[in-house]
Image: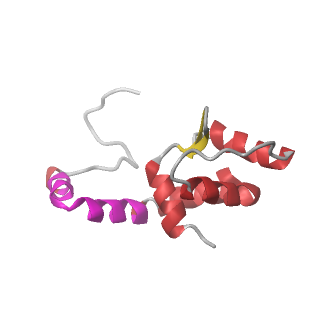
Amino acid sequence: MGFHSAPRSGDVLIEAEDLAKAYDRPLFENLSFSLERGEPYFRNVWDEMAGQYGQPLLRQVAAAPTPLSFANPDPGRLKSLERMTRYRILAKTTDGYTVEVPLIRRWVNDRAPS
C-alpha cells in the first residue's frame, strides 16, 4: 500500500466541496447519513459476525449503559461472545462486555431487525 497519483478502479473520490458540505452539516445529519450509508456493513456485522445466537447478546450489550457481565455463560453464549470479541464488535473489560464501536451500538439500538 502506498501513495499513487492516479485513482485506481473502485477508489472512492471525495471532492473538496463534498468534504466542506460534510463539515457544514449538523452532527445529527452526519450520524444519520453514516447509519444509512453503512447499512450493508452493519447488516453484515448483525447477520454474519454476531449471527443468530449472538444477536440477542449484542442487543443486550448495546442497550446496557455500562459493561455487561454474563456470569457463567453456557458454551454457545461464550462462543458467541468470544467470536464478537475476536471480530472487535465487542470489547471485554474487567467489568464485562461493551460494544467497541459506538456507531455499531447506535445501529443495533436504533435499526437492528427485531
Q: Residue at x 25, y 58 (%)?
A: 27
For the residue pair 81 and 71, the one nearer the viewer reads as 71
Percent across and percent down for residue 91 are 58, 38
Which quarter of the figure has residue 28? bottom left
Q: Residue at x 85, y 44 (%)?
A: 75
For the residue pair 56 and 36, the one nearer the viewer reads as 56
Look at the image and tell me in which quarter the N terminus lies: top left
* Residue 32 vertical position relative to residue 3 in the rendered view, above or below: below
* Residue 2 vertical position relative to residue 62 in the rendered view, above or below: above
Name the side, left or right, on which 37 lies relative to 63.
left
Q: Single out the residue that lies furthest toward the top.
A: 2
For the residue pair 28 and 73, the one nearer the viewer reads as 73
- Number of marks present in the image shown: 0
Which quarter of the figure has residue 84? top right
Q: Residue at x 15, y 58 (%)?
A: 24
Examine the structure image and report whether residue 101 is included in the region drawn in magenta: no
Q: Single out the residue that lies furthest toward the right.
A: 75
* Residue 114 vertical position relative to residue 63 in the rendered view, above or below: below
Look at the image and tell me in which quarter the C terminus lies: bottom right
Name the side, left or right, on which 92 lies relative to 7.
right
Which quarter of the figure has residue 83? top right
Predominant SS along the magenta part: helix
Magenta stretch in the rendered image:
18-36
Q: Residue at x 51, y 52 (%)?
A: 65
Name the side, left or right, on which 64 lies relative to 28.
right
